[in-house]
Image: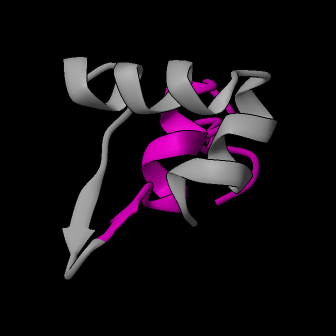
Amino acid sequence: MSVWPEAAGILHLSKASAYAAAERGEIPTIRIGRRLLVPTAALRRLLQLDEPLDAERM
């Protein structure tokens, strides 16, 4: 997903704040050409949405 508007919207950040956080490394990003993207898995980890599987689910 893109830093702006998708990731910024999820994180409730302005455009400037989202890009500044990406520049500081607080939001993990990858660059493809001119686009700065946030991997979905990285954003889920940042928001602590990835729950480890417990033994009962396996």
- In the picture, measured across the screen, residue 17 lies left or right of residue 8, that is left
Q: Which of 16 and 12 is in front in this view?
A: 16
Above/below status of 16 relative to 10: above
Taking the magenta stretch, the answer to whether it contains residue 44 is: yes
Taking the magenta stretch, the answer to whether it contains residue 42 is: yes
- In the picture, measured across the screen, residue 58 lies left or right of residue 37, that is right
| Picture coordinates of residue 27, whole percent (x, y) | 39, 30
Q: How is the image coloured?
A: one colour
Where does the magenta region start and end? Answer: 35-58
Residue 15 placement: quadrant: top right
| Picture coordinates of residue 22, whole percent (x, y) | 33, 31
Q: Nearer the viewer, residue 18 or 52?
A: 18
| Picture coordinates of residue 57, whole percent (x, y) | 74, 54
Above/below status of 11 relative to 30: above
Residue drawn 64% across the image and 45% down it = 7
Quarter occupied by the N terminus:
bottom right
Residue drawn 53% across the image and 25% down it = 16
Above/below status of 41 relative to 1: above
- In the picture, measured across the screen, residue 29 lies left or right of residue 39, that is left
- In the picture, measured across the screen, residue 20 lies left or right of residue 58, that is left
Q: Which residue lies furthest to the front in this view?
A: 16
Quarter occupied by the C terminus:
bottom right
The image shows a total of numbered marks equal to 0
| Picture coordinates of residue 24, whole percent (x, y) | 22, 17
Q: Nearer the viewer, residue 35 or 37?
A: 35
Q: Which residue lies furthest to the bottom in this view?
A: 33
Residue 2 placement: quadrant: bottom right
Residue drawn 20% across the image and 82% down it = 33
Residue drawn 69% across the image and 24% down it = 14
